[in-house]
Amino acid sequence: MLRYVALFLCTASILKATEGAFPLYLNGYNVPKSGYMPPPGLYARNDIYHHNGHVKGSVIGGLATVKANVKISFDVLGLTYISHLKLLEANIGCGVIVPVGRINVHGTLSATIPTVGTQTNALGIPVPQLQLQSITKKKHQVAHGIADTLVIPFMLGWHAPAYDLHIIAFQGVFIPTGKFDKNKIANMGQNHYALETDAGFTWLSTKWGTEVSAITGITTNFTNHKIHYKSGAGWHTDFYIGQYVTSNLEIGLSGYWFYQLTPDSGKGAKLLNGFRSRVLGLGPSISYEFTVAKVPVTVNARYFKETHSKNYLKGDTFYLTVTVPIP
């Protein structure tokens, strides 16, 4: 019995131990033109981001299950600086991405725990008997404020105009700027550092106006010492195929694929069998370019419907992105 009581108590922390079944990297953030580094200068980008998802996990033959419905709404501010300096024929840049917003979590934990009771037989003798006890626990919490910040101290961008090809690579670090409370299931931060290593390309035909872009990267998580838990390394890829239908308007298909390369480790991870995650998202994208007071502005809207998920907040993702240079 004690084994199953421990199982229940461990499963009760699934939502916070697995970091809400959601990675630090915002899938779908870097499409379209994900491999293109703009000319030297300072650029501002703002994203309205919304994800509405749900997750269901089970452990040890379905004895315990956890369900969660989560709504994440962020306003994501990004600043990028591209210098005139070059390294290996590439322009050098840096940047920072800061999400601010709200996370709303509804969680339900159900467990069936075997207990030992007694039943009197025909002779009036108490006889031990195995019984099953069902327990359900519900939680609803909301968190708001700043989330974890991505700092990119170093990025490189190459351009091969003869081939309409652009390549980018960068090394970033997630800083735990978001608030974390181990006793809560809704947290703005994940209370650990992580390395973000990415590389991507954009092929944009100057003849046909066709674009093919993709960026792939690995997020290497460190340990959350407050709960003694470490999420496995995640591999993510954002991709896009689009076509300019006018000189200002581009439409296309965008998508992302996330796959957890290594299992989670630490307290409770073995009971969850490593809790590896994966998801595929696909949907339309539309971009429009115009000028305001001689300042070029790009607006992009994209929507993703998720499928092929496991241990992930499967649902819908929406972005509205505005990018402008700062004179």
Image (spheres, helix red, strand yellow):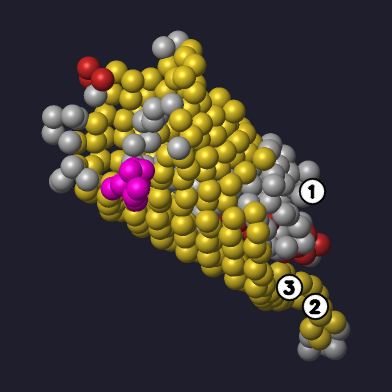
Give the residue at x 34% y 49%: 292
Question: Tag 2, which secondary structure?
Answer: strand
Q: Can residue 220 be seen in this view?
A: no
Q: Quadrant of residue 31?
A: top left
| Residue assigned mark 1 | 226
Residue 105 picture location, percent across and down: 60, 67
Residue 23 got which mark?
Answer: none
Question: What kind of residue is marked 2?
Answer: Gly
Q: Which residue is drawn at 78% across and 89% down?
A: 122
Residue at image mark 2: 117
Q: In percent of the image, x 15 and y 46: which residue is there? A: 245
Task: Specify the quadrant that holds the C terminus.
Answer: top left
Amino acid under disc 3: Leu
Percent x, y of residue 81 = 51, 31
Crowd rating for badge 1 (residues with CA inside 10 Å; few <14, some 14–19, many 20+): few
From the viewer's side, name the closer residue of 19 and 120. 19
Q: What residue type is labelled 1?
A: Lys
What whole-number distance in Å separates the C-alpha atoms at marks 1 and 2?
38 Å
Residue highlighted by disc 3: 130
Q: What element carries label 1?
A: loop
279 is higher (above) or lower (below) than 203 = below
Which of the marked residues, 3 or 2, is nearer the chain's N terminus? 2
Quadrant housing residue 126: bottom right
Instruction: Tell me if mark 2 has few (under 14), some (14-19) or many (20+) residues whose alpha carbon lies within 10 angstroms of its own.
Output: few
User: Magenta residues?
Assistant: 290-299
Q: Distance between the residues labelled 3 and 2?
A: 6 Å
